[in-house]
Image: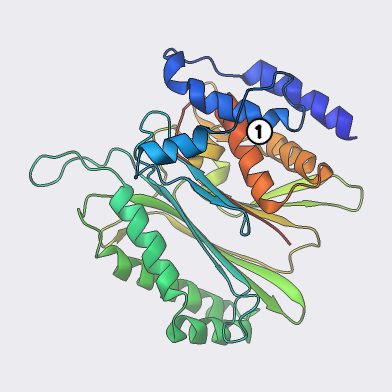
Amino acid sequence: MLQQQRSELKHILHHKQTLYDNAELFSDYKQWAKYVLCQYSILDDTPADNNFLNTLNINSKHANIQTDLRNGSFSIPSPLHPNRNEDCIKTINGNHNTAVAFDFITIVCDGVSNCGFDTAGNPVNGLAASTMITHGFADYCTTSTFNAQLTALTSQITNTTFVDLFYNQLLAKLKEISQSINPPQSATTVALTIEISINKKKYLLAITIGDSQTVCVYPNQQGIYTCKQLSPQAKKFRSFYDPGGVVSANRIVNAHWSCVEQLPNNTIVITFTDGIGDAICELNNHDQARLDTALFCQLVQFCQLNAMTDFEIAQFLTAYSIMITPKPDDIAIHCRQL
């Protein structure tokens, strides 16, 4: 099984591998990606070293490389602007804290690169928005107010009135936090997941705004992997340059809410920005893209066959995406095997 999967992924990589006009600009990124993929024999050549991430971080204080070995987070800026990563990740582990009602929280934001201009005529990107929402909401999730709201929900998880109330409370808080985005034109997508346990059963609550998304991947009894996308927006074909929904100052566009009951055993929860989704994609005749769920499942299954850790899965999916993406972008991804 492992050898068959490796052979198929090598063939797909060879078929999809992207050749860029400005090859020199992307060479270091691809060298790093090749280094990662060679560890699992997806590629046969062996790049000399793995120093690229360290070099990028040293050369730019805003590169915002994130490599969290414990929590399975990985983020890297686009080669188009390596000194400015507009993607942000924040995770909160509540498993060892009896004072909180959640097991794990993941917040991923993708700042929109072109947000127009401020009042002085200066171009605005999404870094301010993605930073404010990620850190502001993470701070809120550690408050007694949030804990009380979540505790009330867990006692009524099957009651849609309570679920809707909790959802509206989260949206209200997001809108409140967004009022501090400066400049106010700055905008970001959001993918928020809250993992909770009730009577030894796992539940997943998720808010998705725009093209960042959360996917649950799990094998059935026959070992066939299924990919469940938690946002209806993510299932649609769309332009690479249409975020599909955003949060900016005091404004939320196209928010979607999901409540997944009783996650199957061996579920892998992966939250990521469109740097992954627009790379591991299928295209229609109008150059619109959506996640290729079959290939995504195949990649995750390969990771599990290789007994990868959460961080190794996040890094592997990033490397594979860099090699095949039709649109280079910042990448932020978090992986959690339940």
Left/right of residue 218 with respect to residue 281 in the rendered view: right
Pointer 1 residue: 36
Q: As displayed, is residue 319 above or below residue 248?
A: above
Q: Secondary structure at mark 1?
A: helix
Q: Can residue 287 be seen by looking at this rendering?
A: no
The chosen color scheme is rainbow
Around disc 1, counting alpha carbons within 10 Å, would you say few (fewer than 14), some (14 to 19), or many (20 or more)?
many
Q: Is residue 8 left or right of residue 103?
A: right
The answer to whether residue 236 is visible is: yes
Q: Is residue 170 left or right of residue 316?
A: left
- What x and y, as percent, mark residue 288? 49, 29
Amino acid type at circle 1 is Val
Tag count: 1
Q: Quadrant of the C terminus?
A: bottom right
Q: Nearer the viewer, residue 329 or 46?
A: 46
Q: Residue at x 63, y 45 (%)?
A: 314
Most extreme residue toward the left is 120
Residue 155 found in image quarter: bottom right
Which of the 4 quarters of the picture holds residue 296? top right
Q: Is residue 252 above or below residue 37?
A: below
Measured from the top left, where is residue 202 in percent x and y? Answer: 72, 71
> What x and y, as percent, mark residue 148?
50, 87
Q: Residue at x 76, y 37 (%)?
A: 298
Residue 80 in the image, given as x and y percentages of width and height: 38, 28
Q: Residue furthest top?
A: 21
Quadrant containing the N terminus is top right
